[in-house]
């Protein structure tokens, strides 16, 4: 059996990454979403069995100590990390896995797993980014400015990624992300099991 592939996806606040991903998952049934452990409080609308497992700082630090995390990062005072086990189980079962992380987490994964395919979701322009962050209407001007600065510093690191998906038109961004996943899956080195099965029969 061929091993599953590891995809990394990042995108700043205002990139629309979550919307793109939700559509991509509908189109890629073999793709599994990697679970994250995090220490920030649960927000309204989030559930304990969603994409995040909410744990205490003590539990998180124990996981670091035990070497249970593939990567981890501290983001605005809270820890975020990817447990190794889920990713390894998926890959060994031949299932592809999508890991959503920030730019620092992506760097750590790339260092450990160079064959992981990384995708950066980016807004089409500065103006669109600013409009998206302002249009939420939930944040004051100072917060919008802070989020904007944080997004820009993440976008400055987009060239560390293998692929850039511009999210202007949603369906095009989804189509392009699926195309990246499909072409990575079609690489010969990802299909040696099939080749061996024929040649060594
Ligand atoms: P939020 O708290 O808004 O859900 O996420 C904050 C940031 O943490 C986002 O940039 C998100 O992509 C990132 N993030 C989510 N899960 C993980 C993870 O497991 N590891 C790392 N390093 N970042 C994560």
Image (cartoon, rainbow, N blue to C red):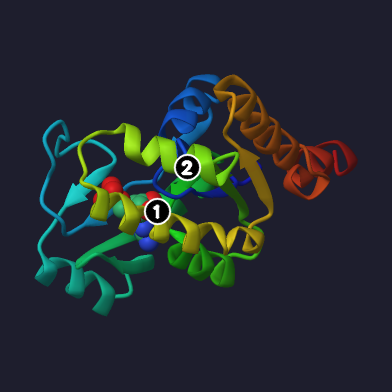
Separation (CA) of disc 1 from disc 2: 8 Å
Quarter holding the C terminus is top right
Numbered-mark total: 2
Asked which quadrant contains residue 179, the reply is top right
- Residue placed at 50% from the left, 43% from the top? 97
Tell me the SS state at disc 2.
helix
Q: Is residue 96 visible?
A: no
Between 87 and 2, the residue placed more toward the observer is: 87
**What residue is shown at x 45% (from left), y 67% (from top)?**
104
What label sits on residue 156 in the rendered view? none
For marks 1 and 2, the one nearer the N-term is 2
Q: Where's residue 199, x and y in %?
A: 89, 41
Q: Residue at x 77, y 37 (%)?
A: 186
Tell me residue 81's x, y (percent).
32, 61
Left or right side of 65 for 126: right
Q: Position of residue 144 (x, y in %)?
A: 30, 49
Q: Are marks 1 and 2 in contact (CB under 8 Å)?
A: yes
Question: Compared with residue 15, is residue 88 higher up or lower down, i.e. above or below?
Answer: below
At horizontal 25% and vertical 53% (from top left) the residue drawn is 143
Quarter of image, res 56: bottom left
Residue 130 horizontal/vertical position (percent): 43, 43
Q: Secondary structure at mark 1?
A: helix
Q: Is residue 137 left or right of residue 31?
A: left
Q: Under 8 Å from ligand 1: the CB of mark 2? A: no
Q: Mark 1 near ligand 1 (CB under 8 Å)?
A: no
Residue tagged by mark 2?
129
Where is 2 relative to 30, above or below?
Answer: below
Q: Is residue 127 visible?
A: yes
Q: Which residue is mark 1?
A: 148
Which of these two is toward me, 200 or 65? 65
């Amino acid at each position: 059996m061929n091993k599953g592939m590891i995809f990394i996806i990042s995108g700043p606040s205002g990139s629309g990454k979550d919307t793109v991903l939700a559509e991509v998952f509908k189109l890629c049934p073999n793709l599994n979403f990697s679970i994250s452990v995090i220490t920030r409080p649960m927000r309204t609308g989030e559930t304990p069995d969603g994409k995040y497992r909410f744990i205490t700082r003590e539990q998180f630090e124990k996981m670091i100590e035990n070497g249970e995390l593939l990567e981890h990062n501290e983001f605005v005072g809270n820890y975020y990390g990817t447990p190794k086990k889920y990713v390894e189980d998926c890959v060994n079962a031949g299932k592809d896995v999508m890991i959503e992380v920030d730019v620092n987490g992506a760097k750590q994964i790339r260092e450990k797993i160079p064959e992981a395919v990384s995708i950066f979701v980016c807004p089409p322009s500065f103006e669109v980014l600013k409009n998206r962050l302002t249009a939420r209407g939930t944040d004051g001007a100072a917060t919008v400015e802070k989020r904007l600065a944080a997004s820009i510093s993440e976008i400055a690191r987009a060239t560390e990624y293998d692929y850039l998906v511009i999210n202007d038109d949603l369906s095009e961004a989804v189509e392009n992300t699926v195309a990246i996943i499909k072409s990575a899956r079609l690489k010969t080195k990802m299909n040696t099991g099939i080749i061996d099965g024929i040649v060594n029969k």
